[in-house]
Image: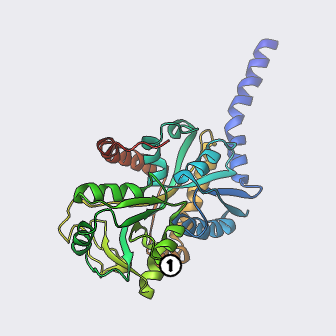
Amino acid sequence: MQRRTFLTAAAAATLATPPLVSARAQDYPTRPVRIIVGFAPGGGSDLVARPLAQKLQPLLGQPFVVENRGGANGNLGLDAVAKSAPDGYTFGHVNNSVIAMNPLLYRNLPFNAKRDLVPLVTVTQSALFMMIPASLPVRTLPEFIEYARRRPGELNFGSGGAGGITHLGFELFRNQMNLDISHVPYRGSAPALQDMLGGRIQLMMDAISLAKPQVDAGLVRAIAFLGRERHPALNTVPTAVEQGYPDLVVPSWQGFVAPAGTPAPVLARLEDAFRRAVADPDIQSVFATQGQNAVFRGQQDMARMIQEEEARWAPIIRDLNIQLD
C-alpha cells in the first residue's frame, strides 16, 4: 500500500510539472532582458534591434536592453549568446550571414551554431544595394564595371566585416565580373560608410537602412538593387538583373536566436511578442523609413531559411576558397 501510494504521488507530481512550467512562462519576464547585437552601434543591425527592444518592453512588461558586442562579423556577440544561461533573459540579433554563413567560413568558432543556438524569429526581409560615392563619375552598374576595369587595383570595397553577407556579395560580384578591387573589412557597416564619405573606399554593398539618408542627401549613389524586384523605398534604382546580370542577387534578412535549451514556452512567448511588435504600424513605419521590409517569420520558418542559406552559399564559399580564422 505504501509503494502504491508513493507511485501515485510521484505520477501526480509528474503530471503537475507542465502546468508549473507554463505558469513560469506566463510570468516571464520578471526582470530586464538583454539583446546582444554583434555589430557596432548605429549600423543596420542596431537600427532594427533597438526599435524592437522599445516595442517589446510594453508588450512584456520589462526593459529589453540592447548590448553591442562588435567584432569578427558578429561572432563575438553570438558566442556570448551561446554561452548565456538558457532562461530567456539573453538572446541575440543575427542576420543571414552571421547565423548561416559564418559556420561555413570560420574554422575555429568557439561555439557550434546548430548545437548551441536555436532559431527564434526573423523580422526583416530585403536585399543589398550596391552603392558608390556620389562624386564617382558613373551612374549605372555597367558604367561602374567599365570604370573598375580601366583601374585595376586602384579601387577599394568596404564591408561590414570579413565573411559577412556584404563581403560575400562583393566576392560574388568580383568573381562574376573578373574585377581587381581590394576588399577592406570594417567592424560594422557604419564605419565603412564613413570612409566612403571620406573618399577612402569607392564601393559598398549594404542594406539601404544604413545609407538611405546619404542617398537622399546626394552624398551616396545607389547603382543597383541586388534583389529580384526593385525596392519600394528606392524604386528608381534598377536591379542588377534589369541591368543585364541575372545571377547577381544577394538577399538579406535579420532575426533573433536564443541559447539552446531555452524552455519552449518562453520561446513561444517571445515569438508571440515579436509577432505583435513587427505587426505594429509604428515599427513598420520605422523600418520602411530605413528601407527595410518588416516581415515576421517564426521559429520553424527561420530554421528552414537558415538551411536554405547554407545550401546556397556553401558551394560559392567552396568555389571561391574563402576560409577565415
Position of 251 relative to 112 (above/below)? below
Of 286 and 281, the residue lying toward us: 286
Q: Quadrant of residue 292?
A: bottom left
Colour scheme in use: rainbow
Residue position for label 1 = 285
Of 17 and 153, nearer the camera is 153
| Residue neighbourhood size for the residue with mark 1, other residues' Cα within 10 Å, grouped as few (<14), some (14–19), many (≥20) | some
Residue 121 position in % (x across, y down): 51, 55
Is residue 177 shown left or right of residue 96? left
Give the left or right position of residue 134, taking residue 107 as reference.
Answer: left
Tell me, yes or no, if residue 166 can be seen here. no
The single residue placed furthest to the bottom in the displayed view is 217
Q: Residue at x 38, y 82 (%)?
A: 134
* Residue placed most toward the observer, 48 or 140: 140
Say which quarter of the image contains residue 282.
bottom right
User: Where's the N terminus, which quadrant?
Assistant: top right
Q: Extreme right residue here?
A: 2
Give the structural element (helix, strand or loop) at label 1.
helix
Instruction: Identify which amino acid the numbered label 1 is placed on.
Output: Ser
Q: Position of residue 173 (x, y in %)?
A: 29, 59
Q: Position of residue 100 (x, y in %)?
A: 44, 47
- State whether residue 323 appears in this view: yes
Please tell me whether residue 97 is drawn above or below residue 244 in the rendered image.
Answer: above
Q: Is 174 positioned to the left or the right of 116 in the image?
A: left
Q: Residue at x 62, y 52 (%)?
A: 91
Q: Residue at x 67, y 49 (%)?
A: 88
| Count of numbered tags | 1
Going by the image, does 15 lie left or right of 230? right
110 or 193, which lies in front? Answer: 193
- Is 120 above or below relative to 279? above
